[in-house]
């Protein structure tokens, strides 16, 4: 597939071809729909092997296990829609867990204070990333690679090996239930509500616009600096949130845990239909992608095969998702003018 | 007092004076045309007015008050809105999202109110009798013409007092262009000022009240539209007589057919095209924009897929990739439409650009010879009179006309004797235009076969030996001799041939 | 002169940085400039340099290779497993491993060039798939130690020079010639600058892209096999640090992450800078965490120095200074 096809511009006069609206709608969302299909298939397979898969308990378990990745991937989704990438979340997550495990103490007030501080640091560091990208006009890949390294290093300095601790009430968060659903599930609900709100705000639309065509957005008066600062700031914020949640699961801090979330956060988003080129995608897709990755892990366990098959399956699914979206793109493009 | 008064305006880009002491004034309720060659300063003026660029000297007054916008937002606040040639739409947003971008009505929780968006869009469409367009369609699915219409809607969304239209009809088919022309009169009747830039004299006469002519960054004439003749306008625009622009046309075509095309189709845009291009001939391709010309050229070059029979110098060939086309003397070369995106490596030197297609010609056993490369470069720079300080100069810092010459040089070095030139003089200054026309005729005299597309009718008429007129993806007519006139081309482009 | 400077400014700066670092480290660590220490620095840098060779080609072409870590690791594991600490089998094992690595590179390249999969995703996927497959195959159990020949290549010496440094020099020469003096290099720079323009100019873009990923796979495999000689055996995760360092070395060496510019000579400087920096650790009593911070800061610094904004600013200041 050559890049030349990308250069085809609309030329035919008159109104655009009247394809069935339903087909247009489907093609526009093809990657997301494919992801949904994959999830259904995987869950179906899982359902034949494991009892009680379609139960509240299973949902609780899976969401609880996926939420760290999901929080990290939320920030990454926003950045990808902007057309960038954030590798520094790896460092931020490590840093967040390290700070939490060493500073929380046992007093709820201190825990609250430090949680807020960690979230603020997350946003600030991200905003700094965005600032450097805009003002110095540097590539997101390299900038966030550098800040990832710096944050990882700071984490190691503060806490050289896994350790520290968090108070009992904090690590009990995951187990708390409300109306039969675990608190992580409620967090997910909150997250989706946030998303549906955010993407309809002017800012959310501006971020999507900038990812879709940076030049047009600029010509239309969008401040690229402001967009970058907010986008990467949010990514840092969600990475910090992911760190906080992670400590409720692990009960400790780890200076190296973050790097295991960087690429999966991108993978979850891409599987869910977020375009690496920017301008397209939704958190709903990322949620589907993250769930797919988690349930593959469950499947591997339940099939009693070596857990080493999990990364293989994840990789294959990722490729399939990208190929599917690439085919859908081509179909949409031949339909499009 | 006029609504808009520009006096002594100047703007420099490095050593180039885009504007020096330009004057311009326009009134409420007027359609005022701005004319001038590419590079005369029109674009710079309107970029300054629209807040995209800051001027260096001079003053601008809107309603008597000093006007110096820091950015496009400030321009909009002052009631000035511009629809540029370079579209500023967001492909992944819908039509209505684009029109009201950054100006959406918000709900109490600061989300965009989609119902309001729809209502305002439909109201706008209705008020100005817009051509049919679905508000909820993603812009990336729209044709170029439809995007232009959305861009116009976007310009009107802020209800500006001054609307600037830069070559807005160039991508519109006849009916929509008519609509736009009517729209400008309607806006003027409403008390707005419409500044209209166009190269199409007929349109300008149709709608303008007055016209201002720019040349070399200054104003050279202001006229009532119906009180000045075409010749005088053109003379002021060019600063010299028209006929010196085009070279003398000496018949150089032989009987040998260089490129024979039959049943040629490409995607949905080109159907069963058929023509012969002869050795020594300059064959023009015309017709309204968007009728398959670009696709024809790109498909012949192998940049896109095609079906059909193509013979080069009598030998059947299949070209599915530019590499199959650029094979030396029996090959076919393309100077593409988009200089910056398809033709030039902006961050590489002129030398590297010139030689990128012919690396084999100066490498032995895979090792490049610096000396041979320099020789090839010198040959082209001298032949085409490419103006650079040294061949190591970055191609991105060289003028548009010279960049075009570099692309020519690149293709000439491949030794292909069939040249496809797509709008070779677009965005090129007048002086270099003349050079390019002369080059085309010189090459034809040497036995090259040239197929060239131009959106400019006079160019086709004066430079081409024959003209293929494309309509709806087919070659509707072939005009030669007396029939090769502006009127003849237009008529073939627009009307069905008599049965 | 000014043309040379304009084209190679960033590479020269990288070497200046390297020398400066050398002197600073020597200041804090008196034994640093000793022959044996310089030698071991060179050896460590060679590993980074060899692996980063492939990455250089891929990045210049506008892509990126995230599959280095596990191509490296797989090569190391498979070689040691099959060789069983013997030299003779290497005759067929090394070509086999190299062929396999080239095959992975081919897959990466085909995915990127023919199917349009973004390089980040394609190489990420092959990386995790390789990781899973090799772990399934070996069950995570350790492999035999490296054959003596490999150890010799990794840590042996010819006279005063480490063998691996000589190997590195040879590879550097080949890479540099490919980039500067071969048609392939020209095609690569054009492709990395603008794929569309390259295609319209008749450059064989698909073939060139695929070749870069094949080269990357090969150098990762070479690096992996040699590494077993250095550490004595293959171990899980031995390739992970090399992803960051290979990209950092290329970036410090002045290549644009977007492609179209840079040279392996620069990457060599980058590899040396990174290695010398890590030698600063014990000298300054820095922890490994501090090293990461320094790495990050160095990347930021080099990219900022190489950036448009700063060079515009620098030029402005320079001209103003000249005028006064």
Image (cartoon, grey):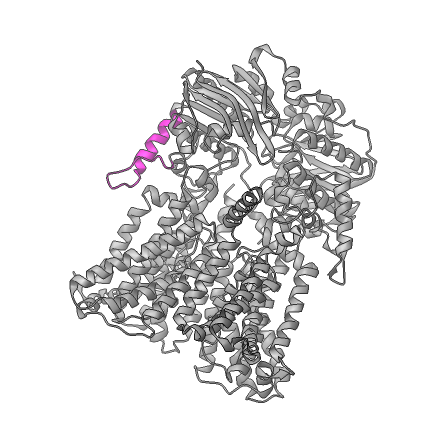
User: Looking at the image, can residue C321 be seen?
Assistant: yes
Q: Position of residue C200 (x, y in %)?
A: 65, 48
Left or right of A52 on screen, residue B252: right
User: Looking at the image, can residue A283 be seen?
Assistant: no
Marker count (numbered): 0
Residue occupying image coordinates x 57% and y 48%: A5
Left or right of C7 on screen, residue C69: left
Residue occupying image coordinates x 61% and y 12%: B228
Image position of C3 with respect to B221: above or below: below
- Specify the farthest residue to the front: C324
Which segment did they paint magenta? Answer: B101-126
- Is the C terminus of chain B in the top left, top right, bottom left or bottom right quadrant? top right
| Snapshot quadrant of residue A44 | bottom left
- Is the N terminus of chain B in the top left, top right, bottom left or bottom right quadrant? top left
Most foreground residue, A227 or A183: A227
Most foreground residue, A52 or B322: B322
Residue occupying image coordinates x 67% and y 49%: C201
Residue occupying image coordinates x 69% and y 38%: B421
Q: Position of residue B380 (x, y in %)?
A: 75, 44
Q: Position of residue C275 (x, y in %)?
A: 51, 71
- Specify the farthest residue to the top: B227
Q: Position of residue A38 (x, y in %)?
A: 39, 61
Image position of C17 with respect to B392: above or below: below
Residue C232 drawn in magenta: no
């Amino acid at each position: 597939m050559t890049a030349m096809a990308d250069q085809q511009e609309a030329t035919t006069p008159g109104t655009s071809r009247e394809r069935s609206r339903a087909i247009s709608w489907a093609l526009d969302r093809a990657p997301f729909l494919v992801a949904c299909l994959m999830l259904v298939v995987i869950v179906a397979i899982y359902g034949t092997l494991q009892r009680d898969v379609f139960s509240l308990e299973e949902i609780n378990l899976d969401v609880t296990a996926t939420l760290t990745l999901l929080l990290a991937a939320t920030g990454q989704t926003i950045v990808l829609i902007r057309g960038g990438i954030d590798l520094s979340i790896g460092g931020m997550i490590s840093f967040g867990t390290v700070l939490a495990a060493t500073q929380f103490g046992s007093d709820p007030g201190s825990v609250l204070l430090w949680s807020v501080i960690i979230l603020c640091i997350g946003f600030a560091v991200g905003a700094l990333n965005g600032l450097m990208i805009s003002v110095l006009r540097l590539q997101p890949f390299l900038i966030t690679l550098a800040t990832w390294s710096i944050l990882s290093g700071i984490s190691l300095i503060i806490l050289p090996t896994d350790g520290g601790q968090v108070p009992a009430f904090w690590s009990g968060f995951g187990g708390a239930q409300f109306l039969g659903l675990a608190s992580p599930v409620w967090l997910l609900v909150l997250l989706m509500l946030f998303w549906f709100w955010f993407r309809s705000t002017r800012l959310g639309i501006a971020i999507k616009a900038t990812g879709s065509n940076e030049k047009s957005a600029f010509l239309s008066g969008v401040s690229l600096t402001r967009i970058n600062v907010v986008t990467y700031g949010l990514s840092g914020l969600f990475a910090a949130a992911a760190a906080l949640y992670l400590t409720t699961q692990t009960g400790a801090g780890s200076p190296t845990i973050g790097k295991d979330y960087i690429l999966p956060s991108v993978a979850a988003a891409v599987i869910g239909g977020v375009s690496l080129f920017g301008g397209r995608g939704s958190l709903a897709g990322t949620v589907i992608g993250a769930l797919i990755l988690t349930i593959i892990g469950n499947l591997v366990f339940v099939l009693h095969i070596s857990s080493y098959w999990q990364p293989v399956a994840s990789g294959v699914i990722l490729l399939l998702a990208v190929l599917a979206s690439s085919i859908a793109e081509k179909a949409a493009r031949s339909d499009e003018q | 007092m006029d609504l808009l008064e520009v006096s002594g305006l100047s703007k420099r880009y490095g050593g180039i004076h885009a504007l020096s002491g330009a004057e311009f004034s326009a009134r409420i309720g007027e359609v005022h045309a701005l004319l001038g060659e590419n590079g005369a300063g029109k674009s710079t003026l309107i970029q300054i007015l629209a807040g995209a660029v800051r001027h260096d000297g001079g003053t601008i007054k809107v309603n008597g008050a000093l006007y110096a916008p820091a950015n496009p937002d400030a321009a909009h606040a002052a009631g000035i809105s511009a629809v540029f040639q370079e579209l500023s739409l967001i492909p992944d947003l819908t039509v209505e999202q684009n029109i009201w971008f950054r100006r959406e009505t918000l709900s109490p929780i600061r989300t965009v109110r989609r119902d309001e968006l729809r209502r305002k869009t439909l109201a706008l469409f209705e008020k100005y009798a817009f051509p049919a367009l679905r508000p909820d369609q993603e812009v990336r699915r729209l044709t170029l013409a439809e995007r232009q219409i959305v861009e116009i809607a976007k310009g009107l969304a802020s209800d500006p007092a001054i609307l600037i239209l830069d070559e807005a009809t160039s991508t519109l088919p006849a009916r929509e262009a008519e609509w736009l022309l009517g729209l400008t009169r309607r806006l003027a009747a409403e008390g707005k000022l419409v500044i209209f830039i166009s190269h199409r004299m007929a349109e300008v006469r149709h709608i303008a009240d007055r016209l201002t002519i720019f040349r070399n960054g200054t104003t050279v004439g202001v006229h009532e539209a119906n009180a000045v003749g075409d010749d005088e306008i053109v003379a002021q625009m060019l600063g010299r007589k028209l006929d010196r622009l085009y070279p003398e046309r000496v018949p150089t075509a032989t009987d040998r057919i260089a490129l024979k095309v039959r049943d040629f189709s490409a995607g949905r845009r080109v159907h069963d095209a058929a023509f012969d291009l002869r050795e020594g001939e300059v064959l023009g391709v015309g017709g309204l924009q968007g009728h398959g010309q670009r696709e024809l050229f790109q498909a012949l070059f192998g940049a896109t897929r095609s079906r059909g029979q193509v013979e080069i110098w009598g030998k059947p060939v299949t070209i599915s990739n530019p590499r199959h086309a650029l094979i030396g003397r029996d090959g076919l070369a393309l100077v593409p439409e988009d200089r910056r995106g398809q033709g030039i490596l902006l961050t590489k030197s002129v030398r590297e650009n010139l030689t990128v297609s012919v690396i084999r010609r100066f490498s032995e056993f895979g090792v490049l010879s610096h000396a041979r490369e320099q020789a090839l470069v010198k040959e082209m720079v001298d032949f085409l009179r490419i103006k650079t300080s040294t061949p190591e100069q970055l191609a991105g810092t060289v003028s548009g006309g010279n960049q075009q010459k570099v692309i020519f040089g690149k293709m000439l070095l491949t030794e292909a004797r069939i040249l496809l030139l797509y709008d070779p003089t677009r965005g090129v200054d007048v002086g270099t235009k003349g050079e390019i026309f002369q080059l085309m005729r010189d090459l034809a005299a040497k036995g090259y076969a040239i197929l060239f597309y131009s959106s400019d009718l006079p160019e086709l008429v004066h430079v081409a030996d024959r003209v293929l007129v494309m309509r709806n993806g087919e070659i509707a007519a072939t005009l030669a001799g007396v029939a090769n006139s502006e009127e003849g081309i237009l008529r073939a482009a627009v009307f069905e041939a008599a049965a | 002169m000014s043309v040379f400077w304009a084209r190679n400014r960033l590479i020269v700066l990288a070497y200046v940085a390297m020398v400066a670092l050398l002197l600073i480290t020597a200041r804090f660590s008196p034994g640093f400039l000793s022959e044996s220490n310089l030698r071991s620095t060179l050896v460590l840098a060679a590993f980074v340099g060899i692996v980063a060779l492939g990455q250089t080609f891929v990045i210049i072409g506008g892509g990126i290779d995230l599959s280095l870590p596990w191509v490296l690791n797989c090569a190391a594991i498979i070689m040691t497993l099959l060789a069983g600490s013997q030299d003779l089998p290497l005759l067929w094992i090394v070509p086999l491993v190299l062929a396999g690595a080239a095959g992975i590179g081919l897959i990466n390249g085909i995915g990127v060039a023919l199917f349009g999969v973004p390089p980040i995703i394609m190489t990420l996927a092959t990386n995790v798939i390789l990781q899973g497959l090799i772990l399934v195959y070996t069950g995570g159990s350790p492999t035999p130690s490296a054959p003596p020949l490999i150890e010799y290549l990794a840590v042996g010496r010819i006279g005063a020079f480490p063998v691996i440094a000589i190997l590195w020099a040879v590879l550097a020469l080949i890479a540099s010639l490919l980039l500067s003096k071969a048609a392939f290099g020209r095609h690569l720079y054009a492709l990395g600058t603008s794929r569309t323009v390259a295609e319209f100019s008749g450059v064989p873009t698909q073939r060139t892209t695929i070749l870069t990923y094949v080269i990357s796979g090969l150098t990762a495999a070479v690096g992996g096999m040699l590494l077993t000689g250095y550490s004595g055996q293959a171990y899980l995760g031995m390739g992970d640090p090399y992803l960051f360092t290979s990209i950092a070395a290329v970036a410090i060496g002045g290549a644009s992450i977007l492609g179209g510019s840079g040279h392996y000579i620069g990457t060599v400087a980058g590899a040396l800078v990174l290695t010398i920096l890590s030698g600063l650790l014990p000298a300054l009593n820095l922890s490994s965490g501090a090293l990461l911070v320094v790495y990050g800061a160095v990347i930021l610094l080099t990219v900022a120095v190489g950036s448009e904004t700063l060079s515009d600013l620098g030029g402005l200041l320079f001209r103003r200074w000249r005028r006064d």
